Amino acid sequence: MPSAVMQHKEPVPAPQSARPPRRTRVLALAEARWAAVATAAFLVALPLQLASVPAWIWGPLYAVSYVTGGWEPAWAGLQALRGKTLDVDLLMIVAAIGAVSIGQVMDGALLIVIFATSGALEALATARTQDSVRGLLDLAPSTATRLRDGTDEETVPTAHLVTGDTVLVRPGERIGADGRVLAGHSDVDQATITGESLPTAKQPGDAVFAGTLNGTGALRVEVERDASDSVIARIVAMVEEASETKAPTQLFIEKVEQRYSLGLVVATLAVFGIPLAFGSDLTDSLLRAMTFMIVASPCAVVLATMPPLLSAIANAGRHGVLVKSAVVMERLGQVDTVALDKTGTLTEGTPRVTAVRPLTGSGLSEDALLTLAAAAEHPSEHPLARAVVDAAQKRGLRIPAAENFTSAPGVGVAATVEGTAVSVSAPGRLPAHADVRAAVSALEEGGHTTAVVLIDDRPMGVLGIADRLRPDASATVCALTALTGSAPLLMTGDNPRAAARLAAEVGITDVRAGLLPQDKAAAVREKEAAGRKVLVIGDGVNDAPALAAAHTGIAMGRAGSDLALETADAVIVRDELATVPQVIRLSRRARGLVVQNLAIAGLFISVLVVWDLAGHLPLPLGVLGHEGSTVVVGLNGLRLLRESAWTRSPAGRRRAGRATL
């Protein structure tokens, strides 16, 4: 499963505690090692058997496959029996042994390999998610600088910080606890908590969160929450809680497995024992019972589900969507409500200059105003400064050198450009000016962040900066609305005006702005409690609780946080938002083929079982029918590997059908 670094990096090196968590390697899991050995032995034995090589060569290889792939489910099944539970794993082992007893060694080995591989994949997914959840706590530093008597410094573990402590956060450090600024000014990157693309100016009285990254100013922070109650710790708790209750369809599957397993065992014993009690030959009764176990075994039922879903997963992967399991692929087709994050999901997550407004009487053109602003901002490493410089470079403007550069966190920058004093400042830090106020208000009403350009302390113009919509955002929202029957919900930590402006552009009416991670998760649970199956699409750590709480979660892969990528059920690797409705359509096709395959498998099993019970089904014919049903459902599922399965929508097929009629 792919991982990614945090969305926004500062030039200062991140502390060791902020590094991505170590992920469990595949072969570090015992389940994966046993499955790999079983599969390798099977793949070597099968061609040898088909080539008519003596059985003493390929037989031991099949035995290795049986033992390595089957001992764990067999042991688990026996343990379940002690608890008076009969599961399908044990049934598969019994069926495999039954296949061996009548000479169908390859059938049993294939069954073993399928179940061993499935168990290994499930174990890997669980381990990776646990690694990521544990790694989230590492976003907060392990130590903090605590102030005693207001001046004396001491380094203490952040776990020892208590409410009322005062900590010093130096430039470039991560904040060690949730608290409130007592002194100092700085810009703090809160993307891990709120998902906002721009750092937030902090001054005395403002709240800060553990794990967020301080900018270029020093802050004194009063701790307001213990480490165990911080926002980042609560995110971990919510992700773990929601992950444990995920996949509700698994309960139904277990019930079906229980009843089928018990029924097949009882039926097999009856097929063997009843004729024997009435004087039938022991060999004939045993042969009939073994034939019954083979034809009634759920191999075709197992393959009825997996080939369509795995083919759909492979097809989606070719188009940049990583779906983590067959269960996820099936669940994607069930969603009827979509909740979207804003920054980094509907938008590109990178601030850009969207408006250059010279003030009346300034005598400056847009290019001249932007040139001066870019020159003053060029030495700065603030994201807004980079946006201004990038805008000037894209216009092909020559950016002159700046001298006497100074920067004040939360205020702006100042420099001398070709002998002229130029500054770029936040409008709230400037004296009231009618023209400036009008220009700033107009831009902010449109959801822009603004900066005022001053020359010799006189306002000369205003810059508007905003995150840019993804090119495919509007079309994706329209497609999701058509698929689910309702417009998506927008959830963001950004301000309401910016959120409302963007929502109006893409056709979203339900907007939830200013949300913290727990608020996003609560909004998802509200929809789920109303009977909706919610798909959440996000990219940041702040989206992880909502991704975990949702029926299904999809993460944007290129800029997504490590936790979001691990928590989500699927990842859009290429950041193409338009692939979301496509993968939902593909999932619905896969679910349709699963139903077809189950009907085919059920028909074959029913006919063969009735034939065996009511008449005399020859063993070769029973095996042929059993394997034939497996091949049919397998080939039917592989249809989803075709390119047309991705590009053709169900609506298009219905229209084509009506035209043909």
Image (cartoon, rainbow, N blue to C red):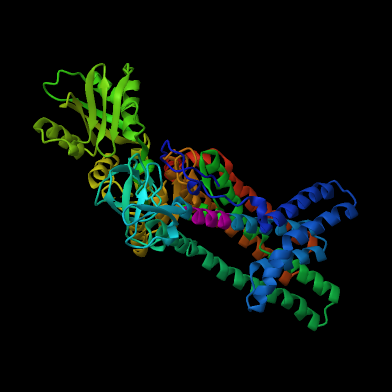
| Nearer to the camera, 320 or 134 | 134
Magenta stretch prevailing secondary structure: helix
Residue 165 visible somewhere in the drawing: yes
Horizontal relation, residue 313 to residue 46: left or right: left
Nearer to the camera, 423 or 62: 423
The quadrant in which residue 431 appears is top left
What's the magenta region?
Answer: 125-136
Task: From the viewer's side, name the closer residue of 631 and 529.
Answer: 529
Q: Quadrant of residue 29?
A: bottom right
Q: Compared with residue 459, is residue 151 higher up or lower down, i.e. above or below?
A: below
Is 300 on the left-hand or right-hand side of 645? right
Compared with residue 290, is residue 198 higher up or lower down, i.e. above or below? above
Q: Residue furthest left?
A: 434
Q: Is residue 536 visible?
A: no
Residue at x 32%, y 19% (from the top left corner): 401
Q: For the point 42% across and 59% down, which residue is it?
A: 233
534 or 188, which is in the foreground?
188
Image spot of residue 632 (x, y percent): 65, 51
How many numbered markers are drawn? 0
Residue 459 location in percent, x, y?
A: 16, 27
Q: Position of residue 462 (x, y in %)?
A: 20, 29
Q: Could you tell me which residue is drawn at 19 percent across and 36 percent down?
A: 427
Q: Position of residue 324 (x, y in %)?
A: 54, 50
